[in-house]
Amino acid sequence: REHGLPPGPPTVPLLGNIHVFETRRPYLKLTEWAKTWGDIYSLKFGSATGVVISSPKLAREYVDLHGATTSDRPPVYVDELISGGLELPLTHYGDEWRLMRRAAHDMISREACNRHLPIQQAEASQLMFDLVGSPEKFYTHLYRYTASVITSVIYGIHCNEYDNTFVEKFDKFTQRLEAALMPGNSPPVDMFPILKYIPEFLAPWKVRCKEVRRDQREIFFGLLDLVIERIENGKTNECFMEYVVERKEHYELDRELLGYLGGSLLQAGIDTTAFFLQNFILCMLIYPHVMKRAQEEIDKVIGHDRSPEFADFEDLPYLKAVVNEVHRFCPTAPLAIPHASTTEQRMGDYMIPKDAIIFVNSWGMYRHEDYYENPDVFDPDRYVKHELGIKAGIDPTGVRNDFAFGMGRRRCPGSILANNSIAINTMNLLWAFDFKKAKDPVTGQVIEVSLENTKREAILLVPTPYKCDIIPRSESKANLIRAQFAAARETFELFEHHIIEIK
Ligand code: HEM
């Protein structure tokens, strides 16, 4: 470890800390080390340096306030093979990132998101309808919801089913993409660049990347071509990609960047929101007293004769506290996406080198004992007592309720769209249904569920599919849901040009 770096776990020659770095659930080990080495410490990966930040105050100082120098991404060779480095979340901090991010802003700014509310509300009415009809498929119904919101907003395409459609194909594709990107599924090329030169016949991971690239381009550019065709045929429906394609000179986006702009938003926006909702339901199963209290609040404010609308969320302080606590307890991306530094920089007592990998440890920040009372306990009341969920009298500098969306200039640009979906659906789910642990049909025993039970843990916290009984709270609510879904047809029609083609 070079002089001037923050301290950290002891290193061994050549490897540094690689031999003790855990790829399966890295956020747990990084948080455990923070207890020994402090809120900022360093790791060595061969000659590369990692810096782990685990306190809100330091994250604000080092990442938010040093955005100009901490907004790059570390090199990911596998992503370069797959997307040529053009997937927005992994793109280097340079012109291509700036151009895509600027255009994305025009779709997911607060003002633009207000225009997307009708489709989110209509899609939520389909989600409720699907849950009444086939509650056992709730996992894929949630995924269809988030997929269809994103395809409607970006490409003007409504997806009305999961099974055997574009949505299922995309879900399976995403799992293959994540597997290809998962540390451990390819040799550590980014730390030992010499490994890039292994010939393909000795490197099945390279072949996998080629196949994923082919499939990804087919999806991204296939969707882009549908939009272009619609513009040419004068059949536009004012979706985001039409807007950008028609102004591509203004946005300075060529075909390659247009394809990856739409595709990146599709890729980044579907899983994340679905995983939040899957985690939300899991928390309701494990903490039924929380579900009951949130339902009592909803019943008092909204009643039983109409379903919740977006504006109601502001009047539901306990439900808001529950949503904040689910983000805190199960952050979808527990280490966000690592940032990287573009210059050598003094930060406090330390000198952080150029190209250091900066881990913003959201998991560690959300579980920081100096800030949160009993951080390992699921307790929405902490957000009722204090709007930031922290202990009374603590210096709140840097504390935010939205660490789950990352930090600095790379902070998630889709957070408003995601939060609107979360607000609409958490209200509707609890207004409409009771969620209960399922029983084994043979033994009659309750099937236990657990938050420990996650998969694809290295990048995102994904609950493994679990069983759950979803029961409409009354027949009159089920009838209202059916009527609302029928009424939503008018909104969907705008987005149904290409359903057949993309199946
Ligand atoms: C609950 C839902 C979501 C969560 C928890 C989430 C979380 C995150 C996080 C942690 C990052 C990395 C931030 C950083 O590097 O500091 C990120 C980046 C990103 N997210 Fe989200 N996200 C969600 C929904 C969405 C949606 C709906 C969209 C788009 C429609 C989206 C688009 C993106 C993009 C494009 C990036 C890359 C930004 C960049 O590197 O400049 N996300 N998200």
Image (cartoon, rainbow, N blue to C red):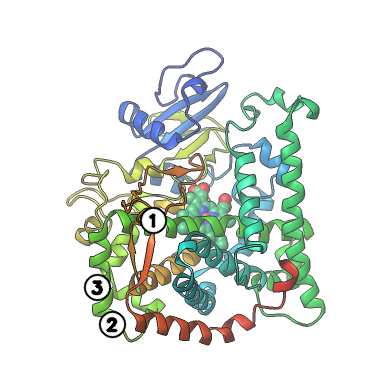
Could you tell me the amino acid type at mark 3? Glu
Between the C-alphas of marks 2 and 3, the distance is 9 Å
Q: Picture coordinates of residue 200 (x, y %)?
A: 79, 30
Residue 147 versus residue 31: which sits nearer the camera? 147
Residue position for label 3: 297
Which residue is rendered at x = 50% and y = 30% of the image? Answer: 50
Q: Picture coordinates of residue 499 (x, y %)?
A: 69, 73
Residue 286 in sight in this render? yes
> Which dot marks residue 107?
none
Q: Residues within 10 Å of mark 2 (few under 14, many from 20)?
A: few
Could you tell me the amino acid type at mark 1? Pro
Between the C-alphas of marks 3 and 1, the distance is 33 Å
Between the C-alphas of marks 2 and 1, the distance is 34 Å
Residue position for label 2: 303
Furthest residue in direction top, as rendered: 13
**Disc 2 + disc 3, Cβ < 8 Å:** no
Could you tell me the amino acid type at mark 2? Gly
Q: Residues within 10 Å of mark 1 (few under 14, many from 20)?
A: few
SS class of the residue under badge 3? helix
Residue 92 in sight in this render? no
> Which dot marks residue 441?
1
Which residue is rendered at x = 43% and y = 41% of the image? Answer: 62
